[in-house]
Image (tube, rainbow, N blue to C red):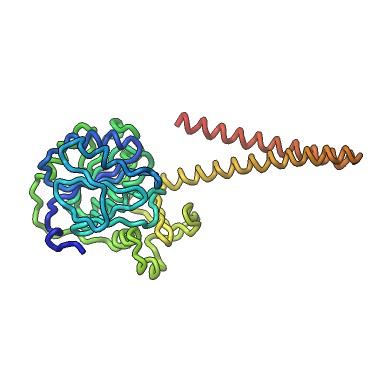
Amino acid sequence: MVDSQKQTTIDNLIVIGTSAGGVEALTYLVQQLPADLNAAVIIVLHLPSQSPSILHNILNGAGKLPVFEAQDGEAIKTGQIYIAPPDYHLVVKLGYLQLTRGPRENHNRPAIDPLFRTAARAYGQRVIAVILTGMLDDGTAGLIAVKMRGGVAVVQNPNDAMYSGMPKSAIENVEDIDYILPLSEIPSILVALANIPMPIEAQKPVPKEMEYESDMAQLNTEILENSTNPPGKPSTFSCPDCGGTLWEIEQGKMLRFRCHVGHAFGAASLLAIQSEEMEEALWSAIRALQEKAKLSERMASRMRDRNLPLAAEQLEQEAQAAQQRSVIIQGLLELSNAADVNA
């Protein structure tokens, strides 16, 4: 149980999302933040589920602020940095953190969108959300949620990022990004924003869709059992994580997808996953064709030994056809790889 007094200690909440190239970017950022930062900082870096939990050790001591791996139910305190552990979404409640094994978003857990979305729901205009280097589009939908609740959006300049995909996606899809900056200028703007007195005004309401998606990330079984009509409309695509129907969501400029049990994808993430699945299918086809060719050749040899030349010739033709199809598919894979390299 979280002490109610702990729920009033946060003036500002800085949430940061990053992926490829993120360790270097986070190390620099943490080094530049002052000890008297008037905000708590919560970070999601994409990590493999079996990755050792060492990011907090890397960042702790790099700067002046203490860095901790987030614990379930832990109170949020100003002047501390919290890191999402591997294979858990890190979500924000009013005054404390929650860890959940909810459905993956953009094929990731931890994912950036649940952090940003739940922070926006809990703290509204007191949220400062930052997108750093990374690939594809995780974080964009969460940044849209932050802006919907009156928070501030800060994005690393794509030309300055080690990997530009996530910053580009945010810039292309989020209305009214407040700051697009090189990494070297982000720490100072965070300090300045944290020191601006918060105006006393009515909070923007929490949209129903934001409540629904926040609850899905938190494994709210009531939402899961009672939701027969998720946000959006049914698409013709299936969820790559569970095989269910994906629902299409248009959120501002962004096209997104979510299945009934909660797996969610930006269009770029879904396309990347489909490309991976297609490649796996093609390699499986190559293996099957090569095995068929070898088996057909072996059976043809046996037919010749038994003085059945017509049967042997037919099997040899089947072996040759299977081998030719295998070569064609290998050529398609080579063209695809060349296109990816030159993209």
Depicted 307 relative to depicted 338: above or below? below
Depicted 301 relative to depicted 76: above or below? above
Give x and y (percent) for residue 106: 39, 49
Picture residue at 26% right of the left edge, 47% below the top: 69
Give x and y (percent) for residue 85: 31, 48
In the drawing, does residue 177 fall left or right of residue 260? left
For the residue pair 222 and 258, the one nearer the viewer reads as 222
For the residue pair 181 and 63, the one nearer the viewer reads as 63
Q: Is residue 266 visible?
A: no
Give x and y (percent) for residue 132: 28, 39
Residue 52, located in which quarter of the rendered image? top left
Picture residue at 22% right of the left edge, 56% below the top: 74
Give x and y (percent) for residue 104: 39, 53
In the drawing, does residue 182 fall left or right of residue 137? left
Depicted 202 relative to depicted 81: above or below? below
For the residue pair 155 and 263, the one nearer the viewer reads as 263
